[in-house]
Amino acid sequence: MSSSRDLAIAFTEARRAARALPDYPGTLPPDLPTAYAVQEEAIGLWTDALVGWKVAGIAETWRPRYGAPRLAGPVFARNFRDARERRVETPVIRGGFGAVEAEFVLRIGRDIPAEARPRTIEEMQPFVAAVHAGMEIAGSPLATLNDLGPGAVASDFGNNAGLVLGPEIAAWDSRVPSDWTVRMRVDGEVVGEGSAARVAGGGPIASLAFLAEHLGRRGRDLPAGSWVLTGMTTGVHVVKPGARAEAEFDGVGTVDVMVTAAAG
């Protein structure tokens, strides 16, 4: 069986070199604790500041095997893009996995301490300083990462390659998730529509509640100023370098992204 460190080295070196991997570089993690052990090793190897986290729902077909409704992965400073006033460029590894996801992004207003216990939506809401329209850039050196399941995904930074920040949503706490509607276009064609109600497990604040407990079990707090990608709303839309993605948040604005090829 591959060690956590060997797997972390393989993924981080491939990411640094912008080099696609032909296969999973070792033994697939059999469960999420093993996968997160790889992720922790990789965070330690990655020379960049941690600015937030992504949360993603786990498909119903995988949940019995992995025993969790969601998974998490880190977001790093060099992959953060501010698209509130302009189109931005975001890289993915040519020959690897690349996708765009329209998401709601939370800005944490005060420290959430590392406590390994369940949290309610009502308990978490005061920690949210702002909610923004946004986009996750999913990405990995391994094109088949998603197909291999949550263990593979969690082991490689949760399949994250970036966070794109869009306009802030006014009066977010007075709207129900089904009213936060979104449309995604890739190269001008509508590829998905949805709302915050589609976010797995009860909406964006429920994702934060999951993340707080999850990080608590890893001994990690969530500092004020962190950003949290809360989960896809219109689907996972595979893209390649050269694609243009536009996430249209009704009544809020558009997040405009040009996908480029990562360079080592």
Image (cartoon, rainbow, N blue to C red):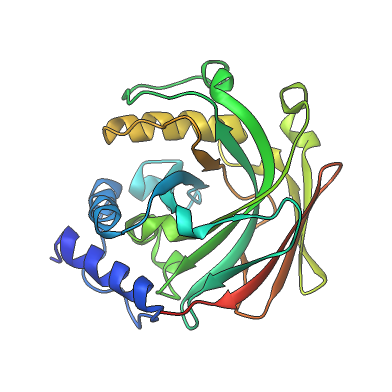
Tell me if 73 is positioned left or right of 55 in this view: left
Instruction: Please provide percent x and percent y for residue 190.
Output: 81, 65
Percent from the top left, x then y, of residue 170? 78, 30
115 and 257: which is toward the camera:
257
Name the residue: 33% across, 79% down.
23
Q: Does residue 195 lie above or below 10 as drawn?
A: above
* Quarter residue 237 falls in: bottom right
In what quadrant of the picture does the N terminus appear? bottom left
Measuring from the top left, give residue 15's x and y in whole percent.
37, 71
Query: Residue 249, relative to residue 221: is it above or below?
Result: below
Q: Is residue 170 left or right of residue 72?
A: right
Q: Residue at x 26, y 74 (%)?
A: 25
Taking depth in this image into account, of 155 and 18 the one nearest to the observer is 18
Image quarter of the C terminus: bottom left
Q: Residue at x 42, y 24 (%)?
A: 112
Residue 181, relative to residue 142: is it above or below? above
Depth order, front residue of 96/47: 47
Give how far across and how far down residue 149 sits, in percent: 40, 60
Asked if one can make out residue 126 in the rendered structure from this viewpoint, the answer is yes
Indicate the quadrant where residue 128 lies.
Answer: top right
Residue 236 seen from this side: no
Report whether 8 appears left or right of 20. Answer: left
Number of dots carrying numbers: 0
| Image: 207 above or below 30 | above
**In the displayed image of the protein, which residue is found farthest to the right?**
251
Asked whether, in this view, residue 190 is left or right of residue 104, the answer is right
